[in-house]
Amino acid sequence: MFISDFLNYIEFERRYSVHTLTSYKKDLQQFSDFLSRVYEIKSAQEIKFTIIRTWIAQLMEEGNSARTVNRKISTLKSYFRFLLKTGKIAQNPMLKITGPKIRKKLPVFIEEKSMNILIDDDLDRNSFKEVRNRLVVEFFYTTGMRRAELIGIKTRDVDLNNQLIKVLGKRNKERLLPIHASLLSLIDSYLSLKKSIETAPQSGAYFFLTEKGKKMYPELVYRIVNNYLSRVSTQKKKSPHVLRHTFATHMLNHGADLNAVKELLGHANLAATQIYTHNTIDKLKNIYKLAHPKA
């Protein structure tokens, strides 16, 4: 099936993230198990588009969401493109495959007045934990970075003189994000308090640390954001990604150029950024209804 060859290719040549690698490996193993169990197929050359359609139908019958099924289809498309490119198959069975339609959901975000309340709260500047947690939230809100990007920031990546942060995004693409002037004082407080934390081996290079001096981890970052957002929001989603959505929506609401927001978010194409314009349009409609005498 050449699955290991494909995984090596996307890891070492395409330099996909660990998260993507894990996802692709899981999808391909599931597909391989299906081929072996239902069709007793062990060779990629035997796979026809009708077989793939049967697998997709089974996934839907098992209750998988359209989004999950489409992700698995995307995995297969990459896999079979690799097999075709390397001459391991003569025809690509994915050419006739289309995925189920996904109902578009608008990104969940926090209203500006709620964010203002959140970041204007009193803060104990002598508490490492309090200062760090506030800085985590404000980094997300003022830059739109992803959770993995925040965790991966090294101390040397934060350039206070030029007010820039260097982050490593998807597929190891670096980008520079501006530091809001209002954060400089908070960053100074954090760095001063951080000196009193005994850093664990291999953790000293990272900007954000736990109270035990270790590198931050995803669950902790989620808890910090969830705790903060719970103070001003009753919505179910209170993840770091909600702050990323909030950053993009507020930027566009204040007239930011769509392409500029795309670059700040690290999106590969403009379509991924355009979902935020729906929220902006809804706001404009409400303003129109309130302001125009004929509305």
Image (cartoon, grey):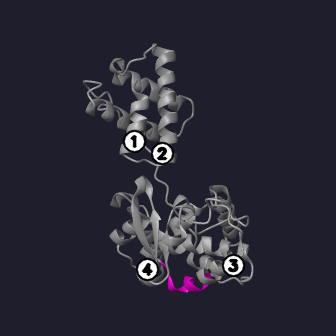
Residue 194, image quadrant: bottom right
Label 1 secondary element: helix
Q: Earlier in the sequence, mark 3 or mark 2?
A: 2
Please give the residue where the numbered disc 2 appears in the rendered image: 20
Q: Residue at x 56, y 82 (%)?
A: 183
Q: Earlier in the sequence, mark 4 or mark 2?
A: 2
Q: Earlier in the sequence, mark 1 or mark 2?
A: 1
Q: CA distance from mark 4 to mark 3?
A: 35 Å
Q: Which dot, 4 or 1, sits closer to the camera?
A: 1
Q: Residue at x 68, y 66 (%)?
A: 199
Q: Which mark is residue 193?
A: 3
Looking at the image, residue 19 sits to the left or right of residue 260; the answer is right
Quadrant of the drawing holding the N terminus: top left
Q: Earlier in the sequence, mark 4 or mark 3?
A: 3
Label 3 secondary element: helix
Q: Which residues are magenta?
A: 179-186
Circles 3, 2 touching at the beta carbon (< 8 Å): no
Image position of 175 with respect to 74: above or below: below
Q: CA distance from mark 3 to mark 2?
A: 35 Å
Q: CA distance from mark 4 to mark 2?
A: 34 Å
Q: Residue at x 61, y 70 (%)?
A: 136
Please give the residue where the numbered disc 1 appears in the rendered image: 10
Q: Which mark is residue 254?
A: 4
Residues 8 and 133: in front is 8
Q: Is residue 81 magenta?
A: no
Q: Amino acid at mark 3?
A: Leu
What secondary structure prevails in the magenta region? helix
Q: Amino acid at mark 2?
A: Thr
Q: Amino acid at mark 4?
A: His
Q: Amino acid at mark 1?
A: Ile
Quadrant of the drawing holding the C terminus: bottom left
Image position of 185 with respect to 263: above or below: below
